C-alpha cells in the first residue's frame, strides 16, 4: 500500500506514477543536493485561500522542496501575495528564507516534477486524492487555479465533471456555498515573458480574491 504522503509530510517517496518516480531517481543521481521527492504544500493547514499550481519546477520546488520557491514562477506569485497581505515577504529563494504565508496555502495538482513540466492525464488523476485531502483539510473559501490543468484537477478533487466549469483567465466559479474557484493563467516564465500574463492582470485576480475574502480594501 502506498503511504499517505500528505500525513507524513511527503518525506517518503510515492511511486504510484512509474514515469515520475523514475524521473525523480534520475534527478537524485544527477543532482544529489536536490529535494527530488514529492513536494508538500506550503502554508497553514487551515487557510482561506488555497493556491493550486501545476507541478514542481525542475530547478525550483523540485530543488528546494517548497512550492514556487527558487524559480521564475514564484517571483510574480509571492510578490503579489505579499502585496495583498497573504505573505510576509515578497520573494522566495529558498525553503529556509523565513517566508510565511498568512491565511494562504500553496500546493500543486501533481506533487512530483514531470519531464518537460508536462504531467500526463493519468498522473494528474493518480495524484488527485492528495489534492482532495488538502482541500478538505484547508477548508478554503477561495481556491486559485493557476492554469487549465490545475483548474480541472480542482474540479476532479471536488467531485465535478471536467466540463462543469470552463477555465478562463479571471473567471470565477461558485463550486460550493462556501467556496469560489478563481482562474488565472499560470505565472510561468513563458506566460509572463510572452505577456500572456502581466503583473497587472495577475494582480487583478489576487485583488478579486482579497476583496471576496475581506471586503473592499
Image (cartoon, helix red, strand yellow):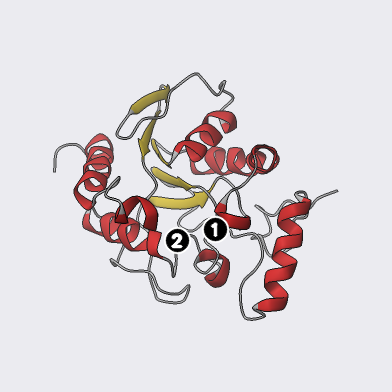
Q: Earlier in the sequence, mark 1 or mark 2?
A: 1
Secondary structure of the residue carrying numbered label 1: loop
Location of residue 79 (image quadrant): bottom left
Left or right of residue 9: residue 77: left
Q: Is residue 193 above or below residue 132?
A: below
Residue farthest toward the bottom in the current orientation of the protein: 33
Quadrant in which the C terminus is drawn: top left
Q: Is residue 130 above or below residue 71?
A: above
Residue 99 is marked as none
Please tell me how crowded label 2 is: few (under 14), some (14-19), or many (20+) other residues with Cα within 10 Å: many
Whether residue 13 is visible, yes or no, is no
| Total numbered circles | 2
- Name the residue rendered at 37%, 35% in the picture: 183
Left or right of residue 155: residue 177: left
Location of residue 49 (image quadrant): top left
Residue 196 lies, in percent from the top left, at: 30, 45
Residue farthest toward the left in the current orientation of the protein: 217
Residue 185 lies, in percent from the top left, at: 36, 42
Q: Nearer the viewer, residue 186 or 158?
A: 186
Please tell me how crowded label 1 is: few (under 14), some (14-19), or many (20+) other residues with Cα within 10 Å: many
Residue 140 lies, in percent from the top left, at: 43, 39
Residue wearing tag 2: 68
| Mark 1 → mark 2, Cα distance in angstroms | 7 Å
Secondary structure of the residue carrying numbered label 2: loop
- Name the residue rendered at 55%, 36% in the picture: 153
Residue 180 lies, in percent from the top left, at: 38, 30
Residue wearing tag 1: 56
Q: Nearer the viewer, residue 111 or 178?
A: 111
Left or right of residue 71: residue 133: right
- Name the residue rendered at 65%, 68% in the picture: 36
Amino acid at each position: 500500500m502506498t503511504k499517505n504522503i500528505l500525513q507524513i509530510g511527503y518525506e517518503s517517496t510515492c511511486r504510484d506514477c512509474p514515469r515520475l518516480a523514475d524521473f525523480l531517481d534520475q534527478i537524485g543521481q544527477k543532482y544529489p543536493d536536490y529535494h527530488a521527492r514529492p513536494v508538500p504544500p506550503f502554508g497553514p493547514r487551515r487557510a482561506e485561500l488555497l493556491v493550486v499550481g501545476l507541478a514542481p519546477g525542475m530547478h525550483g520546488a523540485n530543488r528546494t522542496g517548497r512550492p514556487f520557491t527558487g524559480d521564475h514562477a514564484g517571483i510574480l506569485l509571492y510578490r503579489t501575495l505579499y502585496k495583498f497581505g497573504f505573505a510576509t515577504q515578497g520573494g522566495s529563494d529558498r525553503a529556509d528564507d523565513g517566508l510565511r504565508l498568512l491565511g494562504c496555502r500553496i500546493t500543486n495538482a501533481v506533487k512530483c516534477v514531470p519531464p518537460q513540466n508536462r504531467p500526463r492525464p493519468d498522473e494528474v488523476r493518480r495524484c488527485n486524492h492528495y489534492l482532495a485531502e488538502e482541500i478538505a483539510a484547508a477548508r478554503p473559501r477561495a481556491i486559485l487555479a493557476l492554469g487549465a490543468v490545475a483548474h480541472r484537477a480542482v474540479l476532479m478533487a471536488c467531485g465535478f465533471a471536467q466540463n462543469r466549469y470552463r477555465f478562463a483567465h479571471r473567471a470565477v466559479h461558485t463550486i460550493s456555498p462556501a467556496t469560489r474557484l478563481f482562474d488565472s493563467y499560470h505565472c510561468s516564465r513563458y506566460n509572463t515573458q510572452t505577456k500572456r500574463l502581466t503583473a497587472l492582470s495577475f494582480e487583478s485576480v489576487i485583488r478579486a480574491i482579497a476583496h471576496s475574502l475581506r471586503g473592499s480594501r
